[in-house]
Image (cartoon, grey):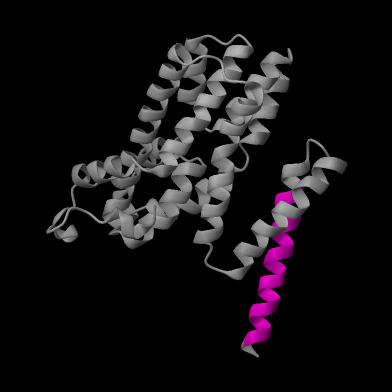
């Protein structure tokens, strides 16, 4: 869904609505889209994996509610099934969530509306930062009035969170166990979809080069440096892409 899909109600002047309630509702309406559906399917795959390792419905819902980012949830589930200790599991989850820090840092200036935005506002909505909400926000928020961005994102993120929690509970209770490969494929839907979405939303050739280098270097680093493959792929691929883009840009200016 692109920014053109997120037009507000026809016949309404956006400048007339500076209150947060209107934009919160618009964000909630925007949550019913393809990315949310794909995320729901990914969590269906996770519930099957969780059932196999013996997690209860309460544990699944608490993990989904407080951790939210699916890769971190899968990492914790794997650590629990392997009998890892609390400290080891916490370190593994923390490392898997490191990727969310630069995403949050990049999104906060887009959401902030000067002194009107309180720190506790940002702390609350930062919980919704994951690939789904981040890509959607970075593609749609810049074209909106600044006063609308925070309530819109809050409406979008909270609605996606609620819908996914409901579908997770329903799939755990109703759906039969899904075969392992199928469940893994469902979990993989989200990163595949948003990889293509991020490529489409890339604004510079350097962004596209970073994604392509990530695809190439990821399997290589996974083979030679398992456990550090994601960090190395992001660092090396991103650095090479940025340096190459910077060199090409300066050369074109000469």
Q: Residue at x 55, y 26 (%)?
A: 45
Question: Was residue 159 drawn as part of the magenta stretch in this picture?
Answer: no
Magenta stretch in the rendered image: 232-252
Please tell me whether residue 19 is drawn above or below residue 253 in the rendered image. above
Residue 128: % across, % down: 44, 37
Question: Was residue 245 drawn as part of the magenta stretch in this picture?
Answer: yes
Please tell me whether residue 27 is drawn above or below residue 54 in the rendered image. below
Residue farthest along the bottom direction in this orientation: 254
Left or right of residue 115: residue 237: right
Q: Residue at x 41, y 43 (%)?
A: 34
Please tell me whether residue 69 is drawn above or below residue 142 in the rendered image. above
Residue 78: % across, % down: 68, 21
Q: Quadrant of the C terminus?
A: bottom right
Q: Residue at x 47, y 41 (%)?
A: 129
Look at the magenta stretch and give its main secondary structure.
helix
Please tell me whether residue 139 is drawn above or below residue 130 in the rendered image. below
Q: Nearer the viewer, residue 75 or 103?
A: 75
Q: Nearer the viewer, residue 150 or 175?
A: 175
Left or right of residue 15: residue 34: right
Query: Can you tell which quarter of the image residue 171 is in?
Result: top left
Counting the numbered discs, the total is 0
Query: Can you tell which quarter of the image residue 142 is in?
Result: bottom left
Left or right of residue 184: residue 202: left
Residue farthest along the right direction in this orientation: 224
Residue 245: % across, % down: 66, 72
Residue 73: % across, % down: 58, 26
Q: Residue at x 27, y 52 (%)?
A: 148
């Amino acid at each position: 869904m692109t920014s053109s899909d997120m037009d507000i109600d026809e016949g309404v002047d956006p400048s007339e609505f500076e209150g947060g309630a209107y934009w919160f509702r618009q964000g909630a309406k925007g949550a019913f889209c393809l990315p949310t559906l794909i995320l729901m399917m990914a969590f269906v795959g996770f519930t099957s994996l969780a059932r196999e390792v013996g997690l209860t419905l309460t544990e699944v819902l608490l993990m989904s509610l407080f951790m939210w980012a699916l890769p971190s949830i899968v990492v914790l589930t794997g650590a629990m099934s392997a009998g890892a200790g609390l400290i080891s599991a916490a370190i593994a989850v923390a490392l898997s969530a490191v990727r969310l820090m630069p995403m949050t840092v990049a999104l906060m200036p887009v959401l902030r509306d000067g002194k009107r935005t309180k720190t506790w506002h940002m702390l609350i909505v930062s919980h919704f930062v994951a690939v789904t909400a981040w890509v959607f926000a970075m593609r749609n928020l810049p074209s909106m009035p600044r006063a609308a961005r925070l309530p819109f994102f809050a409406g979008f993120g909270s609605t996606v969170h609620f819908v996914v929690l409901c579908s997770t509970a329903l799939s755990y209770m109703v759906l039969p166990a899904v075969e392992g490969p199928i469940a893994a494929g469902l979990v993989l839907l989200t990163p595949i979809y948003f990889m293509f979405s991020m490529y489409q939303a890339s604004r510079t050739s350097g962004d596209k080069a970073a994604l392509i280098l990530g695809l190439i270097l990821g399997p290589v680093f996974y083979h030679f440096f398992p456990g550090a493959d994601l960090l190395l792929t992001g660092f090396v691929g991103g650095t090479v892409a940025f340096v190459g883009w910077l060199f090409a840009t300066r050369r074109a200016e000469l």
